Amino acid sequence: MAKSESMKTITVSAALCIVCSILVSVTVVSLRPMQKKNADLDYKKNILNAAGLLKAGDDIEKVFSKVETVLVDFETGKIIEGDAKSYDQNKAATDPANNVKIPADKDIAGLGIRAKVAKVFLTRSADGKPDVIVLNVRSMGLWSTMYGFLALEADTKTVKGFAYYSQGETPGLGGEVDNPKWKSQWIGKSIYDEDFNVAFDVLKGSVDKSSKMAKYQVDGLSGATITGVGVGTSIKYWFGNDAYGKFLANVRAGEI
């Protein structure tokens, strides 16, 4: 009798586990399209926020519909054909078929590799010229790889906005890269000097506003020197001639 009751208990438990597994699987599958849609919406929101194009209450999809997405060959700095909408620059950077190793003497940011092709976001003025340029940036922090967007104005050197959308740095220290107050310092700063050499820097201390270099600098992150250095060196790399430099030169030349 006891054996029969035990078998019933095991059977009921097994059946319950199977039913629950099916329900969980169905739920996961049914929610996947919604999760993908939300992730896509959040990605677009980050781009628009970095560019200063999104206001409270705005419809993200409607605003983003005015943004042009293009693929750019890092080697030539020119726009190339391809499925820009589905291309993932960060994923491509991990794919041997779509990435390149950064030579040690040029890898000032310790990135190791980069994608061969960039995914760039543009808005254009009435004359067809780019007036906002949003670029993917990747930086090495103390604990994580940080992914973000930096937006430039039409002159290709003035920062319109900057933000990391993914980072795993220590809250209150390196995590301050996501502090709105710190990010707001970037707005209006210049990436390049008058000869379009990369001049931007993240200091270890505070910016001396009376210095002629102040327009190229933002305050460091207190207690997070390594994270700050990672941010600063990555900007130097991404905006040099081995990354976005050629593309931005082509924009200035009116070829984009």
Image: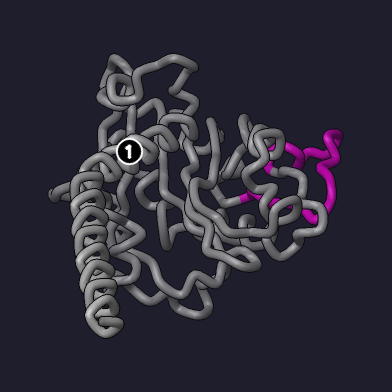
Residue receiving disc 1:
38
Residue 201 is a magenta residue: yes
Q: Which image quarter is the N terminus in?
A: bottom left
Q: Which of 201 and 178 is in front in this view?
A: 178
Quarter of the rendering containing residue 102? bottom left
Question: Label 1 amino acid?
Answer: Asn
- Which residue is located at x 26 percent, y 32 percent? 68
Can residue 60 be seen at all in this image of the molecule?
yes
The total number of labels drawn is 1
Q: What element carries label 1?
A: helix
Residue 128 is a magenta residue: no
Q: In this view, does 45 lie above or below 116?
A: above
Q: Answer left or right for 231 relative to 75.
A: right
Q: Which image quarter is the C terminus in?
A: top left
Q: In this view, does 19 lie above or below 82?
A: below
Q: Is residue 183 above or below residue 198?
A: above
Scheme by which the image is coloured: one colour
Q: In this view, does 3 lie above or below 84?
A: below
Residue 112 screen position, x and y as percent:
46, 75
Dominant secondary structure of the magenta stretch?
loop
Can residue 253 be seen at all in this image of the molecule?
no
Q: Answer left or right for 193 relative to 172.
A: left
Judged from this view, the residue extending furthest toward the front is 1
Residue 172 screen position, x and y as percent:
75, 50
Question: Where are the magenta residues, as a range?
Answer: 199-216
Quarter of the rendering containing residue 140? bottom right
- Which residue is located at x 47 percent, y 36 percent? 151
Q: Residues within 10 Å of mark 1 (few under 14, many from 20)?
A: few
Residue 149 screen position, x and y as percent:
47, 44
Residue 105 screen position, x and y as percent:
53, 78
